[in-house]
Amino acid sequence: MANSLQQRILDDLKEQIVSGAWPPGYRIPFEYELTAQYGCSRMTVHRALTQLAEAGLITRRRRAGSFVMQPTSEAAVLEIHDIKTEVQSLGLPYRYELTARHQRLSTGSDRQRLDSPKAGPVLELVCRHFAGAQPFCLEERLINLATVPAAAAADFAAIAPGPWLLNRVPWSVAEHRIRATGADAETAMVLAVPSGTPCLVIERRTWSAGQSVTHVRLTYVGDRHALVARFAPAESALG
C-alpha cells in the first residue's frame, strides 16, 4: 500500500513539473506539507522526493526545501545559446517573427521527430530570427502538448518558443544532430539567399522524465553561425 501511495505522490509531483505548472526554480511543498496532504508517513514522501531528485527534476537544499531544477542551457553536448543572445553578441539588433502556427493531432512524421510512439496533440511553429535587417535563422519546432499543455495558449508571437520552454519545463535528456545541407527553394526564400546556399542545420530533441517535450530544427546560412566546443582529456589520459 505504501509503495502504491509513493508512486501516486511521485506521479502527481512529476505531472506538476513536466507540465510547466511548477516552473524551474519553484519551491515545491515541504515534506511535512505533503505528508499532511496525502495522509502518509514522512518516509513515503521522502522516498518520492528522492526519486525526483535522482531523475534530475528537482534539487534539494538542506533547510530551504526542494526546488524544480533550473537548467542552465538547452544543450546536451554542445552548448547552443539562445538565438537572441547570439545575434546581440554580434552587435546587431535582434528581431523575431512567428510565421506559422498549427495545432493538430500528431502525424507519423511528427511522432518520429518527437520520439513519441502514441498519437497526441502537437503544436507546430515556424519562426524567423533576424540579425539587423537580414534573416539569421529559420526555426521549425514541434511541441508535444500532451507533455506541455500550457503551450497551446502561449503567445508565441511575443516570445520565441525556445526561451518560453526553458523558463517553464526542465529537461532531463537532450539530443543534438548537426548536418550541412544546401538550401532548397523554400528555405532559400525564407533566409533571403540563393537556392543551394550552404546551410548548417541543427536538430535538437528534449525529454523530461522520459516524456518527449520538443523537437526543433534550426537552419542557419553557413557563414552566419559557428559551433564552438571546448574539451578536456579524462584524468586517466593525463598520465
Image: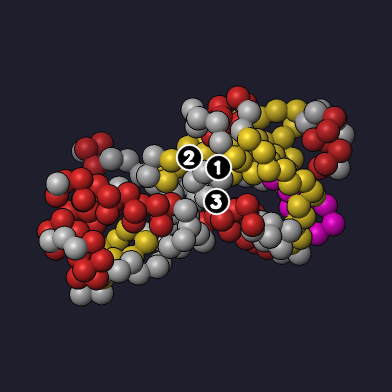
Q: Earlier in the sequence, mark 2 or mark 1?
A: 1
Give x and y (percent) for residue 32: 19, 70
Q: Main secondary structure of the magenta part?
A: strand
Image quadrant holding the C terminus, namely top left
**The magenta stretch spans which residues?**
125-134
Query: What separation in Å lies between label 2 and label 1 (alpha carbons)?
Result: 7 Å
Give the labeled residue for mark 1: 144
Query: What separation in Å lies between label 3 and label 1 (alpha carbons)?
Result: 8 Å
Give the labeled residue for mark 2: 212
133 part of magenta stretch: yes
Q: What numbered label is drawn on residue 149? A: 3
Secondary element type, mark 2: strand
Mark 2 closeness class: few <14, some 14–19, many ≥20 residues within 10 Å: many
Residue in view at x 34 percent, y 54 percent: 12
Identify the amino acid type marked 1. Answer: Asn
Name the side, left or right, on which 140 lies relative to 144.
right
Identify the amino acid type marked 2. Answer: Ser
Name the side, left or right, on which 42 lies relative to 234.
left
Q: Quick one: 239 or 228, which is closer to the camera?
A: 228
106 part of magenta stretch: no
Q: Quick one: 124 or 61, which is closer to the camera?
A: 124
